[in-house]
Image (tube, rainbow, N blue to C red):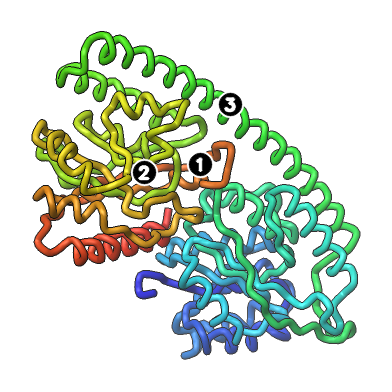
Amino acid sequence: MSTLRLCVIIPTYNNAGTILQVIDDVSKYCQDIIVVNDGSTDNTSDLLNQIVVGDASQGLSIVNCPQNQGKGHALVAGFRKAQEMGFTHAITIDADGQHFADDIPRFLDLMEHHKDAIIVGVRNLTEENMPRQNTFANKFSNFWFRLQTGIDLPDTQSGYRLYSLSSLRGLNLITSRYEAELELLVFAAWAGTPVLSVPVKVYYPPEGERVSHFRPIYDFVRISILNTVLCLLALLRAIRQWAYTIFSFCYFLCSAIELTVRGFFLITLGGATDEHKLKYHEILQRRAHFVINHVPGTTFSYKNASGETFAKPSVIVSNHQSHLDLMGIMMLTPKLIILTKNWVWHNPFYGIIIRYADFFPISDTEQMTAAIAAKVEKGYSVMVFPEGTRSVDCRIQRFHRGAFYLAEKLGLDIVPVFIDGFGKVLPKKSFHLHPGRMSLEVMPRQVMDCDYREMTRRMHRLYVNKSSCSMVSVQ
């Protein structure tokens, strides 16, 4: 948690009766507080000024908006201030006293395992004094949010949330008022940000004491208009995603046919010479490079700070997120042998390409070691996914020892490769592509200076730490 920086954002408009108590309660759990005064017309501004000039202002920042522009605008102002101050995460809490600051640790416990998520505090909607119009609006928004994103969230209108600031790229909203919080969730979900929930307490004072800026008819109309716009965008987004998928599948099909034909003429008819095999690998590398850099709706970045050339044979290992991973790996070097699962090697659609490339099925490591050693003698590196299978949520899974046993047996170094975003563009359980950003990083070569069991543990720790750092980076 030392790599994270958390603040609490409190948007306020005419909450003079509760704002000081909310700030005091929050300060017991987080010292870094940003209050956004959204053009209050009561004495809220005077109260905040009194804190600023006093000793209690340490860690407190005030953002003053000259005119009331709505909660959405206030939240965006708070998020921008938090990003300017270097915070990675922010909790938003309402200024009317309905939320309990002692629920903040609940958010932090969940954030520890989901650093890139938006976490929504789910209220008990049957709580005493809960306004009926709020309950109806919430159920209404929950329905449309599920329709637009496929995510079942029981309280889309809750203002008690924890945001990963890296998920709020751009911060350009269609609306600026009450319904903006729903919009934030929808766009974040579309960008692949996990949306989670945690139960929180809530207090609604009796009707005569309540300060509410929710206008049932006006705000309900605005929510309805927003949902109409979001549904249209969701439809267009779905059409675009399927268009990307169909285009990519057609290209993949044509490429598979071409590679099969070229393999037949080059290797079956031309002879499986070392020269022809290398030429076929060079064709695979060029195709992989083109595909990974032209996946519709995505961007790709490649990092190789150590200047690895792959001239010296090694065992290349990588985390595994998606079917696209193989393309990312094949673009690294033509002199590459990949160990695949048996079903891949025997696949009737592209198995022949795998066999033309001399990729090996993982069946019996001892039996294939001699064949792999022969390829290593010719300058080829060997690639293995230590996890053995793709990760559903892109988390690093348990590493198997086979890759490191092979490196020890053949006297090879380890070259770790870290991929990120591939599983968001083409998730394990998805049938279509998603827009996103992909990256591949070649990390420094590792010498096998310990036995394969210890190297397995060492590499697993490296990937777990690397994955954690990638989640908390602020975009």
Which three-letter amino acid code belongs to the residue tagged 1?
Leu
Quadrant into which the N terminus falls: bottom left
Q: Earlier in the sequence, mark 3 or mark 2?
A: 3
On residue 246, which mark appears?
3
| Secondary structure of the residue carrying numbered label 3 | helix
**Neighbours of disc 2 within 10 Å: few (<14), some (14-19), many (20+):** some
Please give left or right for residue 218 compared with residue 297 in the image: right
Cα–Cα gap, marks 1 and 2: 14 Å
Viewer-nearest of discs 3 and 2: 3
Which three-letter amino acid code belongs to the residue tagged 3?
Ile
Q: Earlier in the sequence, mark 3 or mark 1?
A: 3
Q: Are marks 1 and 2 in contact (CB under 8 Å)?
A: no
**Res. 11 visible in picture:** no
Q: Which residue is mark 2?
A: 439
Please give left or right for residue 470 compared with residue 49 in the image: left
Q: Which residue is mark 1?
A: 426
